[in-house]
Amino acid sequence: MKMTVSDAITMVKTIQRDIRLLLKDEENNSMFNAANIENAEELRPAYDFAETQKKLCEYEEKIRKIKHAVNVFNTTTVLPGFDKTVDEMLVYMPQLTERVSKLREMYFAPERERVEAYNKATTYIDYRYTNYNKEQVTEEYKKLNNYLTRAQKALDKLNLTETFEVNI
């Protein structure tokens, strides 16, 4: 069966929902209460242990196959325009996000800022000064932020358009 990463994610979520429903049904029907004056057989809910376990195993196998196919796709597919596999990019993007966040803080830091000195018996005022070129920070911030945005768009497009085979 051909699918996109987006299709695969949706299918896995659907199967996980089905598993939750199956387990809830099992929880509700694998045990029941009956008073000693009631006929327990008449009150016994429909439940088949073997069938439930079989269905659960089928669902779990489908999830494994889908996730494996996505992993293979991610490790073998190069993200267009980036010379990195999807897998590499998925590792790189959080690293970039952290760097962009740090650069944003550096960008907005005032060049000179008064430092509060608590319990300090002095008449001197301490200041904190930036020790970097703000233009370099700005340039690097814009460059990395742009790269990150382009990478996310490329990943989104790939996840919605490129198909791969899943044997389920």
Image (tube, rainbow, N blue to C red):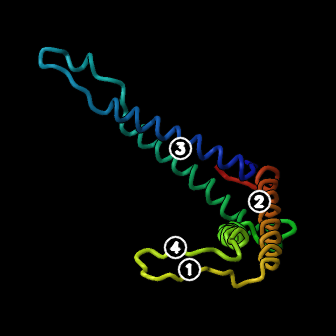
The type of residue carrying mark 4 is Glu
Comparing labels 2 and 4, the label whose residue is closer to the camera: 4
Categorize mark 4 by other alpha carbons within 10 Å: few (<14), some (14-19), many (20+).
few
- Rendered image: mark on residue 16: 3
Give the number of the mark in front: 1 or 3: 1
Q: Which residue is mark 1?
A: 125
Q: Is there CB contact under 8 Å for labels 2 and 1?
A: no
Cα gap from disc 2 to disc 4, whole angstroms: 41 Å
Q: Which of the 4 image quadrants contains residue 151?
A: bottom right
Vertical relation: 126 (above or below) 18: below
Report which residue position mark 2 lands on: 152
Whichever of callouts 4 and 3 sits on the residue coming sooner in the sequence is: 3
Q: Residue at x 52, y 46 (%)?
A: 58
The answer to which of marks 2 and 3 sits earlier in the sequence is 3
**Between tags 4 and 3, which lies in front?**
4
Numbered disc 4: secondary structure: loop
Q: Amino acid at mark 2?
A: Gln
